[in-house]
Amino acid sequence: MKADKVKVERLLKTAKGQIDGLLKMVENDRYCIDISNQIMATQAILRKVNHDILHEHLNHCVREAFITGEETEKIEEIISVMDKLTK
């Protein structure tokens, strides 16, 4: 992985903490909108991490594949990820 590992780990730990908080909110029968807002905040962090990882993948792994003539597999991977993101 070429993305900033420290940044990725920090964001994932934050998302993990938010999920733990969500479980407590559900256990404590908190207000639905509060739970929903927390879910959206967690999703935003995960989207950011995914964006950063994919950005670095394109800048490093895919770029390298084009240089070495192995771009077909990398293009197929990106298409697959794009298909998943747009579902």
Image: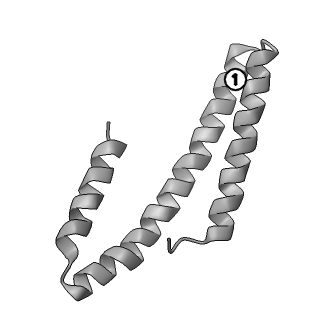
Q: Residue at x 52, y 48 (%)?
A: 47
Residue 6 sits in quarter: bottom right
Q: Secondary structure at mark 1?
A: helix
The quadrant the C terminus occupies is: top left
Few, some or many residues within 10 Å of mark 1 (<14, 14–19, 20+):
some
Whether residue 78 is situated above or below residue 41 in the rendered picture: below
Rendered location of residue 12, percent (x, y) = 65, 52
- Determine the residue positioned at 50% across, 71% down: 1
Residue at x 32% of width, y 74% of height = 62
Percent coordinates x, y for residue 61 in the rendering: 37, 76
Residue drawn where x is 78% and y is 12% of the image: 29
Where is residue 81 drawn, in percent x and y? 33, 52
Q: Is residue 79 above or below residue 21?
A: below
Which one is nearer the viewer's eye here, 41 or 2? Answer: 2
User: Which color scheme does this rendered protein use?
Assistant: one colour
Side (left or right) of 18 relative to 3:
right
Residue that lies at the very extreme toward the bottom in this rendered image: 67
Q: Position of residue 79 (x, y in %)?
A: 24, 55
Question: Which residue is outermost to the right?
Answer: 28
In the image, residue 87 above or below residue 12? above
Figure label count = 1
Q: Name the residue that disc number 1 marks.
A: 35
Question: In the image, 83: left or right of 16?
Answer: left
Q: Residue 17 versus residue 38: which sits nearer the camera?
A: 17
Give, as a three-letter code, the residue at label 1.
Ile
